[in-house]
Image: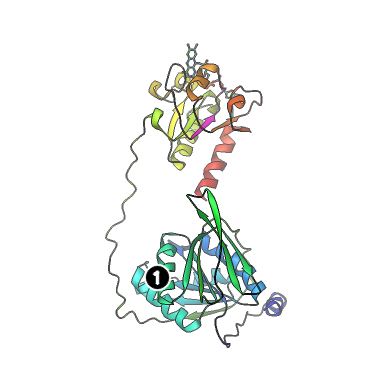
Amino acid sequence: MDLDYLQMLMGEEEVVVEEEGEGYRNIWVVAERVGDELAPVTLEMLNQAQQLASTLGAYVMAVLVGGDETLAQELIYHGADKVFLFDDPALKDYALEPYIKALGDLFAEKMPEIVLCGATDVGGELAPRLARRLDAVALTNCTGLTLDASQRTLVCTMPVYDGEYSEVVAFSPEVHPQIVTVQPGVFGLPYRDEYRSAEVETVAVDLDGAQPRVKVLNVVAEAEREPVPLPKARIIVSAGRGMGDAEGFALVEQLAAALSGEVAGSRGAVDEGWIDEEKQVGMGGATVRPDLYIACGISGAIQHYFGIQDAKFVVAINRDENAPIFKVADVGIVADAKEVIPAIIEALEA
Ligand SMILES: Cc1cc2nc3c(=O)[nH]c(=O)nc-3n(C[C@H](O)[C@H](O)[C@H](O)COP(=O)(O)OP(=O)(O)OC[C@H]3O[C@@H](n4cnc5c(N)ncnc54)[C@H](O)[C@@H]3O)c2cc1C
């Protein structure tokens, strides 16, 4: 396969997958879409699949249900050696029964060695059902994948006890295919190589007897969250005068929303008129005990500290390294909060 790839790089030749062969073979990625794009976890899985494939001397196959040629090409640019595309309009929107039928039939015929699905709502539904249908086993929410190359088995790291510990679990060599769901964000994105070319095979599926048993009638936006009183809040993002202006304060609100936390402030923020007095933390305001308190542009005067001394974990962002807040913070970030907060929000959204 390496030679094929080298030839392709030099001569821009298409990767030609040899499909002949006995037994279970190749690493398969079940692609997922978000709107009209591929879900980032799909690309991350292609990256990981390529590494596994180079150890096993296998190909990376991607299967795209309900997508189109453009997305199939993206899968190739990101590392798929071949794409199987179900472009049936009945499969445009995700529905469990038709998707299981399409994937189950394809896998029963192609006999994958390993199948990677995203640890998403969709992947979490598909993987165990595919395992049942194919008389296989699915390991879910993996945060690490390595190979026992001598046995050709996957060794998966999976969080247990709410993520407090990790378990390392190996498939038994008799299990085929080895199906896993992979947590988004744990593997890097692959390089997008527009010069890669490979085959896209359109596949048809007989959906007789695989009609969806439930139908999505409507999608409603998440109901607005009721504010939690500050003394009971588990996550508080708090603004000080250092946020500079209303625009800076809005960043604190955005960070709190991204963390599903509450917004609070110092006396400085109250004096600036950005926040009501009832949201003031400190001697003249609320005493709080959150799991996480993020102080943004707050000096950490004793009157403020009085209100947060029982907080379990304090993160302080202040551009003055001598600010008293750093004496009580578990993590201190010496920086401009207006630069740091957008970066944190971006990371959280990713
Ligand atoms: C009787 C009494 C009761 C009080 N009760 C309270 C109370 O309940 N709660 C309370 O908070 N205070 C209380 N105070 C007021 C308290 O003493 C402080 O004046 C107040 O906490 C200061 O607010 P601040 O830290 O937001 O503002 P400042 O003291 O002005 O500090 C702003 C901080 O932001 C930093 N900064 C500036 N720009 C940036 C940037 N771009 N990025 C990152 N950091 C930046 C600065 O380095 C500075 O450390 C009380 C005072 C008295 C006398």
> Which segment is the magenta one?
287-300
Q: Residue at x 46, y 41 (%)?
A: 259
Residue in the picture at 42% in, 80% down: 105
Viewer can see residue 236: yes
On whether residue 289 falls in the magenta region, the answer is yes
Q: Which residue is mark 1?
A: 129
Place of residue 126 in the rendered image (x, y in percent of width and height, measured from the top left):
41, 68
Image coordinates of residue 57 in percent, x first then y, are 65, 77
Quarter where residue 128 is shown: bottom left
Residue 105 shown in magenta: no
Q: Secondary structure at mark 1?
A: helix
Pick the quarter of the image with the N terminus.
bottom right
Q: Which residue is located at x 59 percent, y 37 percent?
A: 339
Q: Main secondary structure of the magenta part?
A: loop
**Left or right of 231, for residue 7:** right
Task: Mark 1 and ligand 1: say if the CB distance to the nearest ligand atom is below 8 Å.
Answer: no
Q: Residue at x 46, y 32 (%)?
A: 290
Q: Residue 318 lies in what quarter of the image?
A: top right
Q: Quadrant of residue 232?
A: top left
Residue type at tag 1: Arg
Q: Residues within 10 Å of mark 1 (few under 14, many from 20)?
A: some
Please provide percent x and percent y for residue 334.
64, 31
